Amino acid sequence: MNEENTMNMMNQAYVNEQQITPFAHRYQICVMASKRVSWRIEEDVIRGREFDATQKFLPDQLSRVNQWGFLTAEDKRFVSQIQGRTYANIFGLVERFINAKVLELGQHHVLGDQVALEALIRFSDEELKHQALFRRIEVMTGKVMPEGYYFTIDPNDVARAVLTKSTWAVLGLTCHIELFTQQHYRQSIAECEGLSPLYKDVFLFHWKEESQHAILDEIEWREEDRKLSHVQREQAVEDLMELVAAVDGILQQQAKADASYFIAVSRAAFTAQQQAAIAEQFLSAYRWQYIVSGIQHTRFTKVLSELTTQAQMTKINNALAPLIHSAG
């Protein structure tokens, strides 16, 4: 075989490789974006700073603290700090199972589309970095907040449970999370004055990489959907609803812990009725933050409706209705 024929075969192999997936161009865009926005925890995000206990962490639009009606300004600030600390811990938790699933998906491309493989490897590397960032934030917030806070959920236990469900359902939940993460930053955290500058930067840099993660989530979700029979998709829809219910169980557990911590540390003498209201408000805020804001995201609703039948969408909406109502 002469050199020209060899080169032609190599060129054709390259062309064929690029045509392995209909999403090749979007994978490439994600790789380019990952390279462009790459950042380091200490040098770019932390930059030698510490948290300031006189500043809010989570904006009122997310904490919904202004709906409580009986808190002082000091108490409102403390609620934002508690919820902000939990917010970082929740993301550290979900990124454990997200990364595990991304590594699994990458195996499908090892001997296939190498651009897709690179995109998913970068996705995984960034998720590991995010987990390290949120562990760092937990230590740093713990230094400036009163003792008594605890995060009640083990990320590995959650990951093991989530990964027993269908890949379609896990990708649906992941897409939902990545989309509301971006929305929270753009519409609330970035626009809110008076927040801790360090806290804002944590989620600025997080948002920069989550933007391409959401694209990859959707690509992989659609790819997985193409493989399913009607019976398999029916089960996947059931799995997704079970995962949302499991998320709500986690939120109920953490809301109870955070409400107890707030009541114990606050200088106010709350009545029994107010203490019950505090617990309800923590849970309502968490349901809004981690479930409702995602399922009402226009992109998530669009993709989900394209991947399910009308009957399946009705089933999902009926299952979610009580959570939406309770989140106000």
Image: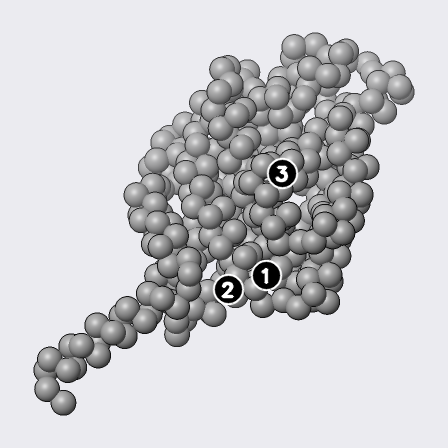
Position in image of residue 324 (x %, y %): 75, 34
Position in image of residue 73 (x %, y %): 65, 10
The span from disc 1 to disc 3 (Cα, nearest Å) is 20 Å
Identify the element where label 3 is drawn.
Answer: helix
Position in image of residue 132 (x %, y %): 48, 46
The tag earlier along the polypeptide, 3 or 2, is 2
Q: Nearer the viewer, residue 5 or 28?
A: 5
* Residue occupying the far front of the picture: 310
The span from disc 2 to disc 1 (Cα, nearest Å) is 14 Å
Locate the C terminus by quadrant: top right
Up-down: is 267 above or below 168?
Answer: above
Kindly indicate the quadrant of the structure image that contains residue 298: top right
Residue on which the image places disc 3? 294
Up-down: is 226 above or below 177?
Answer: below
* Residue occupying the far left of the picture: 3
Badge 1, how many Cα within 10 Å: few under 14, some, many 20+?
some
> Which numbered disc covers residue 105?
2
- Residue drawn at x 35%, y 35% as measured from the top left: 44
In the image: residue 248, left or right of residue 302? right
| Amino acid type, residue under disc 1 in the picture | Asp
The tag earlier along the polypeptide, 1 or 3, is 1
> Which numbered disc covers residue 225?
1
